[in-house]
Amino acid sequence: MNLTYRHILFFIPAWLGLCSAGAQNLVANASFEDVNICTEYKAPCTPSAWESVAPEALKLDYMYHHYKEGAGNNLLRLIHVSQNPLRNYAQTRLLCPLEKGRRYRVTLLGWQDGDVPPELDLCFDTTWLFRESAVILADVVPTLRLGPGNLVKTAGKKKVFTLQQEFVAAGHYGYVAFGTMRNATAAPQVIYNYIDSIAIEPVNGDGRLCAAAARTKDSLYNQHNRHSIPRRAFVEQESQRRRLEARYLRCITLEVKDHRIFTAAGRAEHPATAVRLDSIIKAYNPGTGMKVRITGHAFREGTFNYNKVVAETNARKIMETLIYMKGFSFEDFTVDSKGNNQPRYDTTTAEGREQNNFVELEFCMPLPEEETVSAPPPSRPDTLVVPDVLFRFNSSELNTALLKELDALVQQIPKDGVQLQLVGHTDDRGEAEYNAELSKRRALAVADYLKLKGKGGSIRHVSGEGENRPVASNNTSAGRQRNRRVEIIIYKGAE
């Protein structure tokens, strides 16, 4: 049998797959390559299977990188230390729960600002770890800590560090969260940990995952709402919020300082708000099904818990005024408190901090039946197509003679307020493994060119689909040429 170049390309990945068959990583999407398209923003927001511990206060920072020493081209950026207690944490469900008393090995690739090894705390638990505020998890006891003392390898000019540690599972834990849970000393600036991949494997494993692993992964990948605390964590709060967001409601939102808006002095200080509030109250009729959501915000000196109590007290005073003086009913209200974890105004000035002391009122009334409309279909993101002719034959190298055509495409990308997803595609000629690799290399080549043109900061995900997503028939040369492409998908909005 004569082995051609194409055969060699096919057998190498197959051989590597056999060599790595002993790997039993319990972490889905371990190098964050698979992107999650959030349904509420229609844009990439987190890696699939991963969630933020405080999604409503601080999203999971998800970035593209091009360092060859890494496990892939995507990473998580987690705050390590800063001048304030702000933190973000990543968490996921393990494909198989840990077995109590069994030994496991954690392997992590990453780095920290200043080209030093990352420092991370890991916590294993029996459920998701959600918080309303994005602050240090001082109440969480880490299961283990990784840092310079666990360094086993350093690679590349841009130093990518491999940390490794073994531990014995103290329980049948099925979830893991990581970030900086310790109280760090104040730093002159924000310092980040950059996490390129994480593996959690049993020591001396047989290479097989549990029977439920595939089902667990599907469940994790099918979760597409990651900007709010999910229903499974806070059922009642989430159901109330969903009811207020129902399509058949017309909602009016007002910001007031506090319950003094109902006094003569308060009306004189904020006359426009007082007039709007009067008109809404006049329209109130118990039979209309009006619902009111009152949310308190506070930004005072003191702890988060103190601010949460102050904010809730102000919200309840307004509710009581509407009930006892304006004829509303207790059943009409939902009262919430955000404390100081979701400021809307500049917190670096005294004026801005004072502005963050307010109460939000949301009055929602059902639309008349004839005005009720179905939700519009979601808008499709804009897509630019880099055709096959802009690459050299059977190569990921760009055709320098046609860069003007590529520049014309780049000029169509808005300067600000967008996210970019780059996906490479091929026709079905040749081995599937080779096509998948070629499609990703072409997408990476376009990503590198976009970086040269100042668009690198907008790139959120780069991948290759190989021959899996044809847009035309592969039975004709014209169809195959259309299928050989790189798509630049443009999502509007910073989120």
Image (spheres, rainbow, N blue to C red):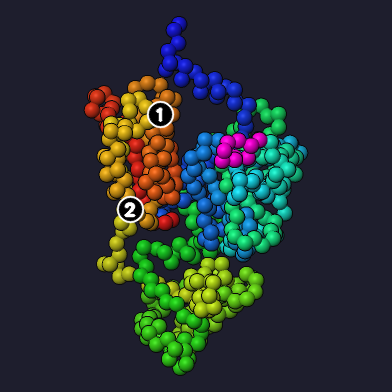
What residue is at 59 percent from the left and 22 percent from the top? 19
How packed mark 2 is, by other alpha carbons closer than 10 Å (few <14, some 14-19, many 20 or more), is few
Left or right of 346? Residue 182 is right
Label 2 residue SS: loop
Q: In which quadrant is the C terminus drawn?
A: bottom left
In the image as oriented, which residue stretches furthest toward the top? Answer: 1
Label 1 residue SS: helix
Q: Position of residue 330 (x, y in %)?
A: 51, 78
Q: In which quadrant is the N terminus drawn?
A: top left
Front residue of this view, candidates 248 and 126: 126
Q: Which residue is mark 1?
A: 438
Q: Is residue 28 magenta?
A: no
Front residue of this view, candidates 261 and 154: 154
Residue 272's place in the image compared with 490, above or below, is: below
Res 57 label:
none
What residue is at 38 percent from the left and 74 percent from the top? 252
Q: Position of residue 438 (x, y in %)?
A: 40, 29
Q: Amino acid at mark 2?
A: Pro
Please state the total of marks drawn on the protein image.
2
Front residue of this view, candidates 254 and 289: 254
Q: Please give the range of residues in magenta.
A: 153-161
What residue is at 34 percent from the left and 33 percent from the top? 398
Residue 15's place in the image compared with 159, above or below, is: above
Res 414 label:
2
Residue 191's place in the image compared with 401, above or below, is: below
Res 106 seen here: no
Q: Is residue 155 magenta?
A: yes
What separation in Å lies between label 1 and label 2 (alpha carbons)? 28 Å
Of labels 1 and 2, earlier in sequence is 2
Q: Position of residue 440 (x, y in %)?
A: 42, 33
Res 8 seen here: yes
Q: Amino acid at mark 1?
A: Leu
